[in-house]
Image (cartoon, grey):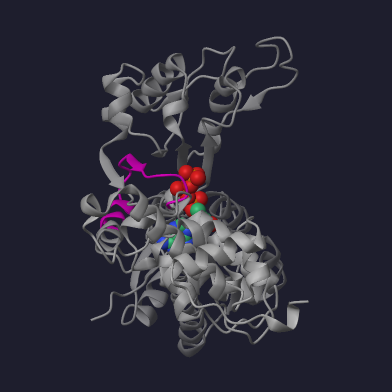
């Protein structure tokens, strides 16, 4: 059974209150108040969905009560109830935020239909809000692409953590998606109407960092011409993202710890503490525990931040994500640049999968962007579109794993042979171009190819 909505009737006449109660009590839970002050008290306790408010009351009249109600909670719906001779006043109340008005004497149906209309409007709004939130959430999660087990476990973890205010420490190499995860925690939690504020501890000059974090009063130091609000205050009610936390100076580590403990900040030059309600997510691309053991990072602060550790694996440890992400970014940049690149060829995906991605997902994203810009519509991306650095650095499956026996020279030859083959394929057998890409003389190229037993197509047309 659905819970009945709560109505509040405000009228100084007992008769009116009773008659309204009789009409409404089947469908609604009815509260009543004999004057404005009592009404405001009841409203403060919350949970009232709609107020039926008499216009003409001694002491505080209906319009004054309406204004007070709206000051207290702008969202609450109010229907004015008035004698016919005051209908004009009741209609005017709509300008002050009343939703509608009813005149006395009223028919029970009129009352019911007006009240029902407001309540179903509220229901619709709530449903829309929910829908909007759902759409945002799925869209939010869509952006994070992964089928890797560890990543899926991370998604499950952050879903649980999102609804708490627990501090989270995200670690991972550069470009692994730390900020994306941090934003996703914020978006999925109950602070998502509050701000997400990021500070990059490595990017801000150390002498400006303190003021960036805490803000300052006018005249607090030379150059402090105006009062400035710090990022902690800006993040109030939301999430503060402390990126590259290991770069934080040690005196500021101490100050941060104090904020986390006391939930208060003081602007520089002021000794008035300001309460802040923030959830802190910190990120690091270095091993913070190491920094602790080398006494570069405060252990007590580390414990405070590391309540829930999230460690994002580098891309090379989740190779199954590479084709998925490549496709994801291809779609993204097709849309962004209004292009129609249909997809990656098998060889191209293969090379991308065997590359070690030191810059992780950001590097892959940048590469796909470059490829999309340079590629021709309707042509599948093949090896020719893959930059030489990637061709040369993409790892080969060792055919002959018995390296000890074959020695270093053999390994080098094997390696060179693969690169030659990759490049030749990329340029569709054009030796002159292959030599150019490899920055070696064409004759050297041919000689090496013969040595490796690579069959070269005749380029007779180009020979003198
Ligand atoms: N799983 C993923 N799915 C889709 N896009 C991703 C994923 N992970 C990261 N990205 C994208 O890769 C880029 C880098 O991610 P992000 O900025 O979050 O990384 P980071 O770990 O904060 O990097 P840095 O240490 O360099 O600051 C962003 O454009 C982000 O949208
Ligand atoms: Mg980042």
Percent position of residue 89, x then y: 70, 67
The reply to whether residue 212 is visible in this rendering is: yes
Residue lying furthest front: 464
| Residue at 33% from the left image edge and 48% from the top image edge | 408
Q: Say whether residue 277 is magenta.
A: no
Residue 288 vertical position relative to residue 461 in the rendered view, above or below: above
Q: Is residue 227 left or right of residue 60?
A: right
Q: How many marks can you see?
A: 0
Instruction: Place residue 184 in its image quadrant.
Output: bottom left
Residue 171 vertical position relative to residue 90 in the rendered view, above or below: above
Instruction: Place residue 429 in its image quadrant.
Output: bottom right
Percent position of residue 120, x then y: 46, 81
Residue 41 vertical position relative to residue 420 in the rendered view, above or below: above
> Which segment did they paint magenta?
157-176
* Relative depth, front residue between 385 and 103: 385
* Relative depth, front residue between 340 and 49: 340
| Residue at 58% from the left image edge and 81% from the top image edge | 457
Percent position of residue 77, x then y: 52, 66
The reply to whether residue 383 is visible in this rendering is: no
| Residue at 63% from the left image edge and 56% from the top image edge | 440
Q: Quadrant of the N terminus?
A: bottom left
Residue lying furthest right: 464
Percent position of residue 308, x then y: 26, 42
* Relative depth, front residue between 449 and 334: 449
Q: Quadrant of the C terminus?
A: bottom right
Q: Say whether residue 158 is magenta.
A: yes
């Amino acid at each position: 059974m659905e819970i009945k909505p709560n109505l509040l009737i405000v009228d100084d006449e007992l008769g009116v209150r009773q008659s309204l109660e009789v009409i409404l009590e089947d469908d609604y839970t009815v509260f009543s108040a004999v004057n404005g002050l009592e009404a405001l008290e009841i409203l403060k306790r919350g949970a009232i969905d709609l107020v039926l408010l008499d216009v003409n009351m001694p002491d505080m009249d209906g319009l004054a009560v309406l204004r007070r109600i709206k000051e207290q909670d702008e969202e609450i719906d109010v229907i004015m109830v008035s004698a016919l001779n005051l209908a004009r006043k009741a209609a005017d109340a709509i300008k002050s935020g009343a939703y509608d008005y009813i005149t006395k004497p009223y028919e029970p149906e009129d009352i019911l239909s007006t009240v029902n209309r407001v309540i179903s409007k509220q229901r619709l709004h709530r449903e829309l809000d929910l829908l909007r939130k759902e759409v945002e959430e799925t869209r939010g999660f869509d952006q994070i692409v992964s089928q890797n087990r560890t990543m899926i476990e991370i998604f499950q973890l952050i879903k649980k953590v999102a609804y708490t205010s627990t501090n989270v420490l995200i670690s991972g190499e550069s470009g692994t998606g730390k900020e994306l995860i941090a934003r996703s925690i914020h978006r999925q939690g109950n602070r998502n109407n509050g701000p997400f504020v990021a500070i990059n501890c490595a990017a801000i000059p150390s002498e400006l960092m303190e003021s960036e974090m805490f803000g300052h009063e006018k005249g607090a130091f030379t150059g402090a011409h105006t009062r400035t609000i710090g990022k902690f205050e800006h993040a109030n009610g939301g999430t503060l993202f402390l990126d590259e936390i290991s770069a934080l100076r040690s005196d500021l580590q101490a100050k941060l710890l104090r904020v986390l403990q006391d939930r208060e900040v003081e602007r520089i030059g002021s000794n008035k503490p300001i309460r802040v309600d923030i959830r802190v997510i910190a990120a690091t691309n270095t091993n913070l525990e190491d920094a602790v053991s080398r006494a570069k990072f405060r252990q007590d602060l580390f414990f405070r931040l590391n309540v829930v550790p999230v460690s994002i694996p580098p891309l090379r440890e989740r190779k199954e994500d590479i084709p998925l992400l490549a496709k994801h970014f291809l779609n993204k940049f097709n849309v962004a640049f209004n292009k129609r690149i249909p997809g990656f060829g098998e060889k191209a995906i293969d090379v991308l999968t065997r590359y070690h991605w030191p810059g992780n997902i950001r590097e892959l994203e940048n590469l796909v962007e470059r490829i999309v810009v340079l590629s021709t519509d309707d042509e599948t991306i093949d090896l020719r579109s893959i930059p030489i650095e990637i061709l040369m650095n993409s790892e080969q499956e060792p055919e002959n794993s018995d390296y000890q026996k074959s020695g270093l020279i053999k390994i080098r030859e094997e390696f060179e042979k693969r690169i030659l083959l990759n490049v030749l394929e990329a340029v569709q057998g054009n030796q002159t171009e292959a030599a150019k890409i490899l920055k070696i003389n064409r004759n050297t190229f041919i000689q090496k190819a013969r040595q490796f037993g690579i069959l070269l197509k005749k380029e007779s047309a180009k020979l003198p």
